[in-house]
């Protein structure tokens, strides 16, 4: 039986799927990586899908925006990742924003990124300041990363401070913001992290990051195509999550979402960010089965 076929329908133990969780699944974000092998998977996206397009150190930011242009032509809603460490200088930053404006992209995702050697910007916060200035009046929504499971090289305190600094920066600029969480496979860790930041005054909407329906063979194949260096950096940053993926033949996102379904409304989880690893067909089948 394929992973797509084995994806189970969601029967919440206390009744129907809570409305907030159902809305998040209905309009979930599909994360894609610009790779040639993606061509066969794009047709499996639902009509008008919200698609997050990554910035891989094995590619360029132009590759990210080229895929966004292609998705726009197909009627989808792409959100490009602008990786701070891949931006060479001020001219490059302006060129990227200009391309976004040309494509009519008013929403971007600002992340530090995994490039080993940064250009002008060492981290997302440094780039975000310039991004808001350059894109003033044109970029009206910016996503930032959240780390319920921590980060391989950034201390927890620094992650928390950056989260609140970015919230203040976006608020002062009059720009909408949201936080997408990086992969974490513990519902308790996610719930605890959300409760803590909400109690401390973090008010931005949160998109819960969850691995899509993925099998080990395809994950390994994708890692090889991305390149050993990139894959090792990704593994270091997401070690616990990827080990969980490798520990079984495949992964069912419901195992993480089910325990959190009742918390979506209370903790302002408004979206679902699905790391598809370019296995769109299987993840789309899971989405259908969940919605019945």
Image (tube, grey):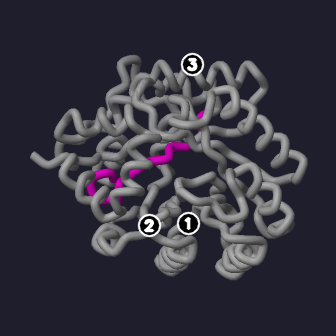
User: SS of the residue at dot 2?
Assistant: loop
- The magenta segment is 269-283
Residue beneath disc 2: 58
Q: CA distance from mark 3 to mark 2?
A: 34 Å
Q: Looking at the image, which is closer to me, 202 or 27?
A: 202
Q: Residue at x 33, y 33 (%)?
A: 10
Q: CA distance from mark 1 to mark 3?
A: 31 Å
Residue beneath disc 3: 192
Badge 2 density bin: few <14, some 14–19, many ≥20, Cα 10 Å: some
Q: CA distance from mark 1 to mark 2?
A: 24 Å
Q: Is residue 267 left or right of residue 55?
A: right
Residue 275 % position (x, y): 42, 49
Whether 275 is among the magenta residues is: yes
- The answer to whether residue 75 is seen in the rendering is no
Residue beneath disc 1: 77
Residue 47 % position (x, y): 44, 66
Residue 214 % position (x, y): 27, 48
């Amino acid at each position: 039986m394929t992973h797509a076929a084995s994806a189970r329908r969601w029967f919440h133990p206390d009744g129907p799927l809570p409305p907030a969780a159902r809305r998040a699944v209905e309009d979930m974000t599909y994360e894609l990586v610009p790779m040639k092998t993606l061509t066969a998977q794009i047709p499996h996206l639902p009509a008008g899908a919200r698609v997050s397009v990554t910035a891989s150190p094995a590619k360029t930011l132009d590759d990210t925006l080229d895929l966004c242009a292609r998705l726009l032509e197909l009627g989808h809603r792409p959100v490009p990742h602008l990786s701070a460490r891949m931006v060479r200088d001020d001219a490059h930053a302006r060129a990227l924003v200009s391309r976004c404006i040309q494509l009519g992209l008013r929403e971007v995702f600002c992340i530090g990124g995994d490039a080993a050697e940064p250009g002008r910007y060492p981290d997302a916060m440094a780039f975000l300041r310039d991004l808001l200035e350059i894109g003033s009046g044109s970029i009206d929504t910016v996503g930032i990363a959240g780390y319920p499971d921590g980060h391989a090289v950034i201390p927890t305190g620094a992650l928390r401070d950056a989260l609140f600094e970015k919230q203040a920066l976006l608020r002062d600029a009059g720009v909408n913001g949201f936080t997408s969480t990086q992969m974490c496979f513990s519902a308790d860790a996610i719930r605890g992290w959300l409760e803590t930041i909400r109690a401390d005054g973090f008010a931005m909407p949160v998109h819960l990051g969850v691995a899509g329906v993925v099998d080990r063979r395809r994950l390994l194949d994708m890692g090889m195509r991305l390149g050993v260096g990139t894959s090792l950096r990704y593994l270091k940053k997401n070690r616990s999550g990827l080990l969980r993926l490798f520990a079984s033949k495949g992964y069912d996102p419901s195992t993480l979402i089910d325990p959190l379904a009742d918390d979506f409304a209370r903790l302002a989880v408004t979206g679902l960010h699905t790391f598809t690893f370019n296995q769109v067909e299987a993840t789309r089948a899971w989405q259908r089965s969940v919605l019945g």
